[in-house]
Image (cartoon, grey):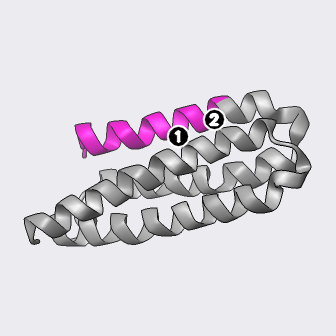
C-alpha cells in the first residue's frame, strides 16, 4: 500500500471514529428534534469507518488477524448506539458505558493486536 494512501485512510478513519463517538454521546443528551441530524452524521461516519477500515485491513494485512474481526464487531455495536440512544432514553447511562467499552476495545485491538 502506498504510504500516502495509508496516511490519508488512517486520518479519515480516526476522524470518522471521533465523529461517531462524539455524535453518539451527543445523542444521549440531544432533544428528539436533533435525531435526523445526529443519525445523518453517525451514518456518514460509520460508512467512512467501514470503507477505510476494510481497505487498510486488506492493504496491510491481506484480511488476516482475528483482532480485526473483534474490531468490526465493536464497530457494529458503536454503529447501533446512536439509534438506541434516541429509542431507549431510560437506559442512557448503561449505553454510555457500553459505548465507552466498545470504543476502548477498538483502540486496544488496533494497538495491541493480541491475535
Q: What element carries label 1?
A: helix
Q: With 76 as the anchor, is 88 left or right in this view?
A: right
Residue depicted at x 81% and y 41%: 30
**Magenta residues, dominant SS class:** helix
Quarter of image, res 76: bottom right
Residue depicted at x 74% and y 60%: 37
Magenta-drawn segment: 97-115
Is 16 placed above or below 24 here?
below
Closer-to-camera residue (56/113): 56
- On residue 102, the disc is 1
Mark 2: give few (<14), some (14-19) or many (20+) Cα within 10 Å.
Answer: some
Quarter of the figure with the N terminus: bottom left
Mark 2 and mark 1 in contact? Answer it, CB < 8 Å.
yes
Quarter of image, res 3: bottom left
x and y percentages locating residue 79 in the rendered image? 61, 56
- On residue 83, the disc is none
Q: Is residue 99 magenta-colored?
A: yes
Residue under numbered circle 2: 98
Q: Is residue 114 visible to the viewer in this orientation of the structure?
A: no
Q: Is residue 21 visible to the viewer in this orientation of the structure?
A: yes
Closer-to-camera residue (21/41): 41
x and y percentages locating residue 96 in the rendered image? 68, 32
Q: With 80 as the anchor, is 29 left or right in this view?
A: right
Q: What element carries label 2?
A: helix
Q: Is residue 37 magenta-colored?
A: no
Residue depicted at x 62% and y 65%: 43
Amino acid at each position: 500500500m502506498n504510504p500516502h494512501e495509508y496516511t490519508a485512510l488512517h486520518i479519515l478513519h480516526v476522524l470518522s471514529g471521533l465523529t461517531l463517538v462524539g455524535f453518539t454521546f451527543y445523542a444521549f443528551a440531544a432533544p428528539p428534534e436533533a435525531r435526523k441530524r445526529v443519525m445523518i452524521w453517525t451514518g456518514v461516519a460509520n460508512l467512512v469507518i467501514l470503507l477505510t477500515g476494510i481497505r487498510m485491513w486488506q492493504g496491510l494485512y491481506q484480511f488476516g488477524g482475528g483482532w480485526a474481526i473483534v474490531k468490526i464487531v465493536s464497530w457494529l455495536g458503536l454503529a447501533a448506539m446512536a439509534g438506541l440512544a434516541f429509542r431507549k432514553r431510560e437506559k442512557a447511562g448503561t449505553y454510555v458505558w457500553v459505548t465507552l467499552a466498545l470504543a476502548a476495545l477498538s483502540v486496544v485491538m488496533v494497538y495491541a493486536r493480541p491475535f
